[in-house]
């Protein structure tokens, strides 16, 4: 096949996987109900140059690409389509820089959310976005899906922390978007446009994220029990009306409580 020959000529052979069983393991995320097609190849990229080479070849041959991180999503966004190349970015997992002065970090897309949190905590810093999958999900996937978490009520979602990124466009060009300073007021927010784009605008190969200082006050947990969802909702509204913004807020229904107790 001409496409596979071109792929083999452009990328190291150990980056290309054609084993059907291995490809099947990468062909879907955690959305069990969502359909998944059959890819023709899996590429495990190690750097932006490999991503750029792959995208250029796929553009030339009209082959679709499905980028994926850790595959922890619940919407089928990382699921393969028939005849595609799966681009696995979880191997690009280096924290490239932590800048305590500017309070930012530069990471590759395969860095796991909690690994970044642990690394910046050594500098007295904190990365707030906390999706439920943070022990396994990657910053690239979080960025592509604009992941949130229970802390988003007070601290916001991923889009609020992405300052800039490097992206391979559909024509195989590597471009730099956004900034790496705390203040940014000039021009279009093209980096923000890519956050939540689910891989439809390009492949993210590097992300610069904003950090906060670690909270120094002790955390306290308050639990309330309510007879109905309506009453629980009214309690949330009353909390906000009182000027209180919890750092995390979550509703647990009776079925989940019973499962936890059991």
Image (cartoon, rainbow, N blue to C red):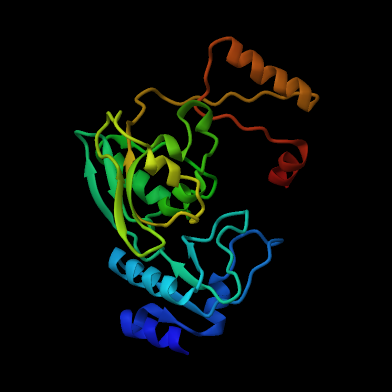
Q: Is residue 58 left or right of residue 74?
A: left
In this view of the protein, can residue 207 be seen by the observer?
no
Question: What x and y, as percent, mark residue 140?
Answer: 42, 53
Name the outermost residue toward the right.
227
Give the residue at x 46% y 26%.
219
Give the residue at x 55% y 61%.
78
Give the residue at x 58% y 76%.
24
Q: Is residue 128 left or right of residue 24?
A: left
Q: Is residue 139 left or right of residue 75?
A: left
In this view of the protein, can residue 10 be seen by the observer?
yes
Q: Nearer the viewer, residue 122 or 240?
A: 240
Question: What x and y, as percent, mark residue 187?
Answer: 32, 34
Q: Is residue 54 above or below residue 1?
A: above
Residue 110's image quarter? bottom left
Q: Nearer the viewer, residue 95 or 17?
A: 17
Q: Nearer the viewer, residue 54 or 131?
A: 54
Question: What x and y, as percent, mark residue 213?
Answer: 31, 30
Residue 108's image quarter? bottom left
Give the residue at x 71% y 61%.
33
Q: Is residue 48 above or below residue 11?
A: above
Question: What x and y, as percent, mark residue 54?
Answer: 38, 72
Name the outermost residue toward the top.
242
């Amino acid at each position: 096949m001409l496409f596979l020959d071109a792929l083999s000529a452009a990328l190291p052979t150990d980056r290309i996987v054609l084993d059907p069983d291995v490809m099947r393991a990468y062909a879907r995320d955690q959305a069990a109900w969502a359909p998944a097609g059959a890819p023709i190849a899996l590429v495990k990229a190690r750097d932006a140059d490999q991503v750029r080479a792959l995208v250029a070849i796929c553009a030339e041959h009209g082959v679709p690409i499905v980028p994926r991180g850790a595959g922890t999503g619940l919407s089928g966004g990382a699921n393969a389509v028939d005849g595609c190349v799966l681009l696995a970015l979880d191997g690009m997992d280096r924290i490239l820089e932590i800048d305590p002065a500017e309070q930012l970090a530069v990471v590759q897309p395969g860095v796991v959310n909690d690994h970044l949190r642990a690394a910046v905590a050594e500098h007295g810093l904190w990365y707030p976005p906390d999706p439920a999958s943070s022990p396994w999900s990657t910053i690239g996937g979080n960025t592509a899906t604009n992941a949130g978490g229970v802390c988003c009520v007070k601290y916001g979602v991923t889009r609020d922390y992405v300052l800039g990124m490097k992206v391979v466009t559909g024509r195989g060009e590597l471009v730099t978007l956004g900034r790496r300073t705390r203040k940014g007021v000039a021009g279009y927010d093209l980096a923000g446009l890519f956050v939540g784009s689910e891989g439809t605008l390009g492949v993210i190969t590097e992300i610069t994220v904003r950090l906060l200082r670690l909270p120094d006050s002790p955390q306290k947990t308050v639990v309330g029990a309510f007879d109905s969802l309506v009453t629980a909702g009214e309690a949330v509204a009353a909390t906000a009306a009182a000027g209180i913004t919890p750092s995390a807020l979550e509703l647990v229904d009776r079925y989940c409580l019973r499962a936890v107790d059991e």
